[in-house]
Image (cartoon, helix red, strand yellow):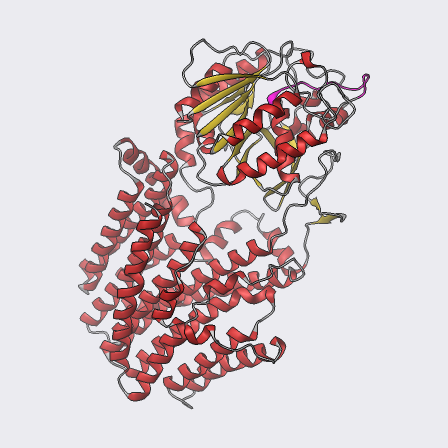
Amino acid sequence: MRTACLLLPRAGSVAPTEPGPARLAAQVRALGVERVVVVTAGDTGLPDGLEGVEVRRAGTWTQLLEVLPDLAATSTTLDLLDGSLVAHDAVLEELLLSAGDGALVAAGTGHPGELPARVVDGRLSDVAVPTEVAARSGAADPGAEAGDPGVGGAPAASLGGPTVAGALHVGPGAIRPLQEALERLRGSGTGPDDGDGPFGSGDDDVGLPQNGPAVPPDGPSVPPDGTGAVAWLVRALVRGGTPVGLVDPRGLVLRRVGDEVQRDAARRDLAEIDGEAGRLARAVKARDGFFTTYLVSPYSRYLARWCARRGLSPDQVTVASLFLGLVAAAAFALGTLPAAVVGALALQAAFTLDCVDGQLARYARRFSARGAWLDAVFDRTKEYVVYAGLAAGAVRAGDDVTVWWLAGGALALQTLRHHLDFAFTVHREAREEPLPVRDLGDTADWLADRTATVAGAGEAARPLARGGLLGAARRLEGVPGLRWAKSIIILPIGERFAVISLGAVLLGARGTFLVLLGWGTVAAGYLTTGRVLRSVRSRHAPAPAASPQRAFLDLGPVGRRLPATPLPGAVLAPLTLGLGIAAPLAAAAGVMDARGLVAGVLVAGLLLVVARPPRALDWLVPPALRAAEYGGLLALAWWAGSTAAAVSAFVLVALVAYHHYDTVYRDRALGTTPPRWVDDALGGWEGRLAVALVAGALGFPAVALAALAAWCGGLAVVESVGWWRRATG
């Protein structure tokens, strides 16, 4: 059950004004949250008989800590909201209906009542509590006067740096950490009548929690609002090592209303700021490619809303996008200029719908693991069949068989780039330093630069500024227009489909493939260089006991049974690299044919498996094995010289790439990988390459490539589709 908990101010403090708790409770219920619980010591301000709303009495911090564990234990998700919040539906929807498992807190927008936060490398690492801000500002009684400027006598935004508002979402995966955080909070106090501890709750008749450490009688008082309670809960989570993400209102309203002035300002902003336009804008990715951002999203978002209002699902739009991709491929396969124009238009329409399905999912909050899988698989399918259509059309128009090899090279390069992305993401997540576990009562200086340092467990604050090439790259990111130049260089899908559409009409298939290969190589080199530099710099970061890359090696029975080598990685790694470079050079110089090349890369890949490279660079191993297999299969097709071999190699690489993508998608979505019997039956990368090599040596590579394609397609695709249907219900 999804539960939202509204924390109302105590009796005698600034009263909630209209729009207030009644409006907020109605908004939350309208979003589909099954249970709304209002926690207060006094009058709720809610109309009687409001459906789906219950009231819990809690007048002290200690009493609140007795209510929340029960709510957490009976909820699948739990949202804690300051009852005086005013917000657009779109912001609450993104926070409360998040598809993620973790915890999220609303980022502040520079208004009164927000609390300072420390954000490091995009991660929330700490949050101030009201008494810390009050002590720093020197306010005598920040809650006594109408027009209260905010916690601590001044808006938190005036203290500089990021802030958080009083809205916390706890997803299914963060419920247990929240329960542990509540235990820590309860164990840190000395009882409801003792104000000496860090969480002294004061007298029972003062209303809702004091929201912070006790302060001397002559010190500043603190307005006991729900935002302060939320701040303590967020602090307990992050100081307990649980990551808490940030939801940016992105121009919409989400703020605490504490008096007439703030009420009027909130009403004015709610009326002036178009919430529907904001919701539509939030359906678009905050960071996307240049082509998508400026040439597709400005109109695709309206198509997404049109689909939502007619009850279409994201999956239906995804299927329509695939259909248009198949139409484009069929048009390209005709090999004429008018057909190429039709194919280019159909491909752009397919890409538009590819954007629409994701925007529709975000706009309508309709997320699913199956939908994400369908979107990813159909994206790859569209691209592969378009490559095949271009190659078939070129041969039909009189080009030679080598265009199929170029099509296979473009397919292999793009797949390799994706696997570099996947591998580096896994590597970065595995080596990411966990949030340090710290004492809840530690006081931080919230006037310090909260974006420049982070305190580690038992160590001094570590500056984040970096020098050298990486530092220069980070500084250049602030140059106007450079971010878009970078996004174009890496050739994202929007730019890639634009190249295919324009190239098919203006350059023909061969010219299009050459542009894709050249641009893709530059993009891969640019990204990989930066990632290698970052990996080397972080080589002293803590690493998991077992490499997380092992699941992505795609080893068959032979590869898994390779004995551990007595030679150190420092010896094997250069040997592997040398062999991997020497074999292609020897083949290019005519010293040996493609069969020798494939034998060389096969041995180099097997050495790489047992070499155990430095953990900082082990993320390069799976992409290197992908390059060895794809390159080896295409090289054998080149050596065979027949159309049958070239087409069979293209299809085989596409199907093997599907298996590799499927492995990654299962891991990222549901934390699992294909069963071992599938890898054994498919032979692993080394088994498939060895079979193709032996067939080439015996003189029938085309037959072997076709047979392997049929086997991989019949097993990997059928097993994958069946598994996803069962796993996602």
Looking at the image, residue 722 lies above or below residue 95: below
Residue at 32%, 65% in the rendered image: 654
Indicate whether residue 258 is drawn in magenta. Answer: no
Nearer to the camera, 159 or 25:
25
Indicate whether residue 218 is drawn in magenta. Answer: yes
Q: Quadrant of the N terminus?
A: top left
Looking at the image, residue 359 lies above or below residue 434: above
Q: Quadrant of the C terminus?
A: top left
Looking at the image, residue 349 lies above or below residue 711: above
Residue 507 placement (x, y as % from top left): 29, 65
Residue 580 placement (x, y as % from top left): 49, 79
Q: Give the total of numbered labels.
A: 0
Residue at 35%, 49% in the rendered image: 727
- Identity of the residue furthest to the bottom in this view: 591
Secondary structure mostly seen in the magenta stretch = loop
Part of the protein shown in magenta: 216-226
Residue 695 placement (x, y as % from top left): 30, 83
Residue at 36%, 37% in the rendered image: 366
Residue 635 in sight in this render: yes
Residue 384 placement (x, y as % from top left): 30, 62
Looking at the image, residue 593 lies above or below residue 649: below
Is residue 534 shown left or right of residue 75?
Answer: right
Is residue 125 shown left or right of residue 631?
Answer: right
Residue 403 in sight in this render: no
Residue at 49%, 25% in the rendered image: 4
